[in-house]
Amino acid sequence: MTLGGTWYLALAAVLFSIGAVGLLVRRSVLVMFMCIELMLNAVNLTFVTFSRMLGDINGQSLVFFVLVVAAAEVVVGLGIIVSIFRRRPDATADDLNILKG
């Protein structure tokens, strides 16, 4: 049994929607960060699905670059988030103005 590309696109849309709602609703910086990662993975799923449906490898190569950028984002983002939580354990997204110099 194989699933068509429509199912994968629907799954990507659901994952992206969950990530977008989580990003807009939640105030915890760590949860917001995970929601962004969920949205990036939904976009990757869309790229792979279209690449498979169209028989073109460009979508899959673009996913590779997105994964590299996401890994760099995780390193920098988690470093900033951990730094903020060490100083203020109850920090929320509204408290990010402390990053101003």
Image: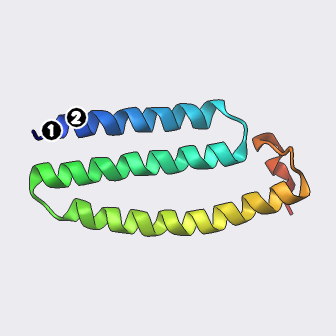
Residue type of the residue flagged with mark 2: Trp
The image's colouring method is: rainbow
Q: Which residue bears the numbered disc 2?
A: 7
Residue type of the residue flagged with mark 1: Leu
Which quadrant would residue 66 be assigned to in this image? bottom left
Question: What quarter of the picture does the C terminus occupy?
Answer: bottom right
Q: Name the spot of residue 82 as percent of width and height, x first.
A: 76, 60
Which quadrant would residue 77 be assigned to in this image? bottom right
Q: Residue visible at 58% across and 48% down?
A: 34
Q: Secondary structure at mark 2?
A: helix
Q: Name the spot of residue 2 as percent of width and height, x first.
A: 11, 41
Question: What quarter of the picture does the N terminus occupy?
Answer: top left
Q: Is residue 51 visible?
A: yes
Q: Is residue 58 left or right of residue 12?
A: left
Q: Which residue bears the numbered disc 1?
A: 3
Q: Is residue 99 visible?
A: no
Q: Residue visible at 44% across and 69% down?
A: 68
Which quadrant would residue 24 be assigned to in this image? top right
Q: Residues within 10 Å of mark 2 (few under 14, many from 20)?
A: few
Real-space Cα distance between discs 1 and 2?
7 Å
Q: Name the spot of residue 87 as percent of width and height, x first.
A: 90, 58
Q: Is residue 61 left or right of residue 30?
A: left
Q: Name the spot of residue 71 as percent of width and height, x first.
A: 51, 67
Is 41 situated above or below 16? below
